Image (cartoon, helix red, strand yellow):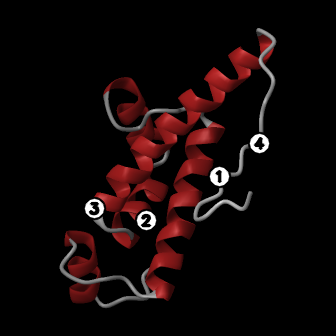
């Protein structure tokens, strides 16, 4: 996105500064662009191995924007979340194929009325 001064961006990337709402929004836009590129190339795990290599090769601009606009810890978290979310969705899909029924559970906290 490039809206922020380099000092401010560096502070956000290292965790020395807390991102503002606009800076968080810029991060999410950059993340979504990177993930869209990964999706278009069927790359799930961009954290290691072949997936990381392919992401760097096929989505260099999106990765650069993602790493520039987000805190380093956020980049790591979002990449790992993508892998975990994919595994969760695949597991749910498998369970449903085996006949499992999805239940929407809404926990209630506090004092229960009898």
Which secondary structure lies at badge 1? loop
For this rendering, which residue is in front, 3 or 106? Answer: 106
Q: Residues within 10 Å of mark 4 (few under 14, many from 20)?
A: few
Residue matched to label 2 = 65
Residue 7 picture location, percent across and down = 21, 87
Which secondary structure lies at badge 2? helix
Tell me: 32 left or right of 65.
right
Which secondary structure lies at badge 4? loop
Residue 96 picture location, percent across and down = 78, 19
Which secondary structure lies at badge 3? helix
Q: What is the C-alpha distance between the residues marked 4 and 2?
A: 37 Å
Residue 8 picture location, percent across and down = 26, 87
Q: Residues within 10 Å of mark 1 (few under 14, many from 20)?
A: few
Residue matched to label 1 = 107
Q: Residue at x 52, y 33 (%)?
A: 44
Q: What is the C-alpha distance between the residues marked 1 and 4?
A: 10 Å
For this rendering, which residue is in front, 68 or 75? Answer: 75
Q: What is the C-alpha distance between the residues marked 1 and 2?
A: 39 Å
Callouts 3 and 1 close, C-beta under 8 Å = no
Dot 4 or dot 3: first in sequence order is 3
Residue matched to label 4 = 104
Which of the 4 quarters of the picture holds residue 101?
A: top right
User: Visible in this render: residue 36?
Assistant: yes
Residue matched to label 3 = 72
Q: Nearer the viewer, mark 3 or mark 2?
A: 3
Q: Is residue 53 above or below residue 105?
A: above
Dot 3 or dot 2: first in sequence order is 2
Q: What is the C-alpha distance between the residues marked 3 and 2?
A: 12 Å
Which of the 4 quarters of the picture holds residue 32?
A: bottom right
């Amino acid at each position: 996105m490039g809206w922020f001064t380099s000092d401010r961006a560096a502070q956000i990337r290292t965790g020395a500064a807390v991102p503002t709402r606009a800076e968080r929004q810029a991060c999410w836009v950059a993340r979504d662009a990177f993930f869209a590129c990964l999706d278009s190339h069927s790359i799930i795990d961009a954290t290691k191995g072949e997936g990381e290599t392919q992401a760097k090769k096929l989505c260099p601009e999106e990765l650069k924007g993602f790493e520039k606009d987000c805190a380093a810890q956020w980049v790591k978290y979002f990449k790992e979340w993508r892998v975990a979310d994919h595994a969760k969705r695949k597991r749910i899909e498998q369970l449903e194929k085996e006949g499992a029924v999805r239940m929407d559970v809404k926990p209630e906290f506090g004092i229960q009325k009898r």
